[in-house]
Image (cartoon, rainbow, N blue to C red):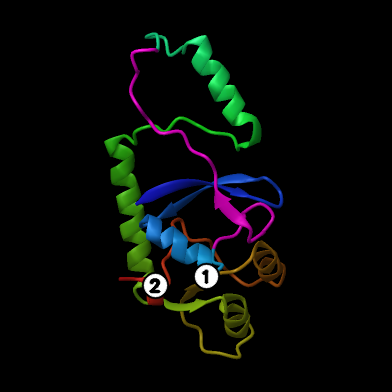
Amino acid sequence: MIVFDLVCREGGHQFEGWFGSSRDYEEQQLAGLIDCPTCGAKTIEKAAMAPNVGIKGNQRSDGAISSAKQTNVSDAMDDTHSVGKAVEIPSEYKELIGKVADAQAKMLEKSKWVGADFSEQARAIHYGEKDATPIHGTASTDDVAELKEEGVEIMPLPLPVTPPKSQN
């Protein structure tokens, strides 16, 4: 599992995306499966991230850097996104994420992937036009709001799902 800081180009909203691999991110991005959870925009890109590296010889133990380095860093930041220092995930969190992933996989075992047709399929089931069967797929923020207004029972999945055709 890999976590990327993502940013919506339209609204500048930052959020995290969890993916099985860098390739999973790229495939989902190309397929238009990633959207901003705040505004629903599809123009998403990775935000600049700072690597978690140890202290160098030109740094003090309190984390301050030399003034020459500070100037270079501030010059480089003129046209970039916000960054954060990567932190190591504690083992109990990794275990918890693993349990959530296992629970989600168990839920989806009997669920059918419907991809971008999720909204239409969910409506058809809700209005009795199709047999009630568990489904999962993708929906925009607007589609989710409309489904909720119509009383269609849906829930977000806790972790991203790789479409079956994109899996190894």
- In this rendering, the answer to whether 133 lies above or below 143 is below
Residue visible at 39% across and 72% down in the picture = 166
> Element under label 2?
helix
Q: Which residues, given as a range, are shown in magenta?
A: 34-58
For image coordinates 61% across by 91% down, the residue present is: 129
Residue placed most toward the observer, 123 or 7: 7
Near-viewer residue (107 or 58): 58
Above or below residue 43? Residue 112 is below
Q: Which residue was labeled with disc 2?
A: 166
Q: How many residues crowd around disc 2 within 10 Å: few (fewer than 14), some, or many (20 or more)?
A: few
Magenta stretch: residue 43 in it? yes
Residue 114's mark?
none
Please state the horizontal and vertical placement of residue 2, each as a whole percent of the image: 38, 49
Q: Is residue 153 above or below residue 67?
A: below
What residue is at 61 percent from the left and 85 percent from the top? 124
Residue tagged by mark 1?
31
Q: Amino acid at mark 2?
A: Ser
Image quadrant where residue 71 sits: top right
Q: Are marks 1 and 2 in contact (CB under 8 Å)?
A: yes
- The Cα–Cα distance between marks 1 and 2, rounded to whole angstroms, is 10 Å
Q: Amino acid at mark 1?
A: Ala
